[in-house]
Image (cartoon, rainbow, N blue to C red):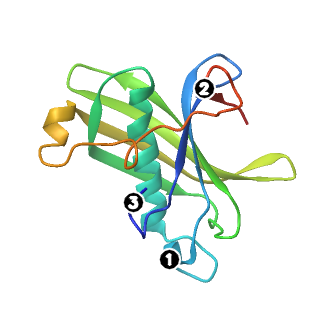
Amino acid sequence: MLNDAGVKAEFYNCVDEDGKVALITKLDPKPIHQSYPNRMHGGVIGAILDESIGRTIQIEHEVWGVTIDLSVKYRKPVPLDTVLYVESRITEIANRYFCGVGTMFYMQDGARVVCATGEAKYFNRTYDQVFTTQKLTPENWFIVKDKEDNNGEFHL
């Protein structure tokens, strides 16, 4: 949130129609994230998917992830002039790692338009293993809860 070039993403707990836990990332891209005219840079897309998938584990577990592997599939150009979302969920949790998937999309005429998908694997770390010098504060790392929902869940 304090990075001037950051995407200023908001993160929400989500429960899908099957009752499965996910994370919804919401962001409003800026010109600084552009590659071709009015298109988000592929590296920024990958970074957003990585960040979103990696944070999803924290909804139910006190685990931090260090990315081991990230695979991104680019399906459509990602426009800069619309609100973007990433829905991510954890697919596997093991003793030393966890895996997850994410889908980047925007809404058009009430339907999702999928722009990119990602799969990632993370090495499990504790808070102290990740943050050796700078400690987190609510201003620089947090999951935003939907203030209109008593359960803190976001629904699309």
Residue at (42, 66) in percent of width and height: 43
Residue at (22, 19) in percent of width and height: 95
Which one is nearer the viewer's eye here, 96 or 131? Answer: 131
**Whole-Å distance between the Cαs marked 1 and 2?**
31 Å
Q: Is residue 69 above or below residue 21?
A: below
**Residue at which label 3 appears:** 2
Residue 98 coordinates in the image, percent (x, y): 32, 29
User: Given this view, does label 1 or label 3 mark the residue nearer the observer?
Assistant: 3
Q: Counting other residues with Cα less than 10 Å from the Cα at mark 2, is it few (<14), some (14-19), or many (20 or more)?
A: some
Q: Is residue 35 above or below residue 46?
A: below
Residue at (39, 41) in percent of width and height: 138
- Amino acid type at mark 2: Gly
Q: Is residue 55 above or below residue 134?
A: above
Which circle's residue, 2 or 3, is located before the other in the chain?
Answer: 3
- The outermost residue toward the right is 109
Secondary structure beneath disc 3?
loop
Secondary structure beneath disc 1?
helix
Q: Counting other residues with Cα less than 10 Å from the Cα at mark 1, is it few (<14), some (14-19), or many (20 or more)?
A: few
**Residue at which label 1 appears:** 32
**Residue at which label 2 appears:** 152
Is 57 displayed left or right of 79 in the figure? left
Q: Quadrant of the N terminus?
A: bottom left
Residue 133 coordinates in the image, percent (x, y): 13, 48
**Whole-Å distance between the Cαs marked 1 and 3?**
15 Å
- Amino acid type at mark 1: Ile
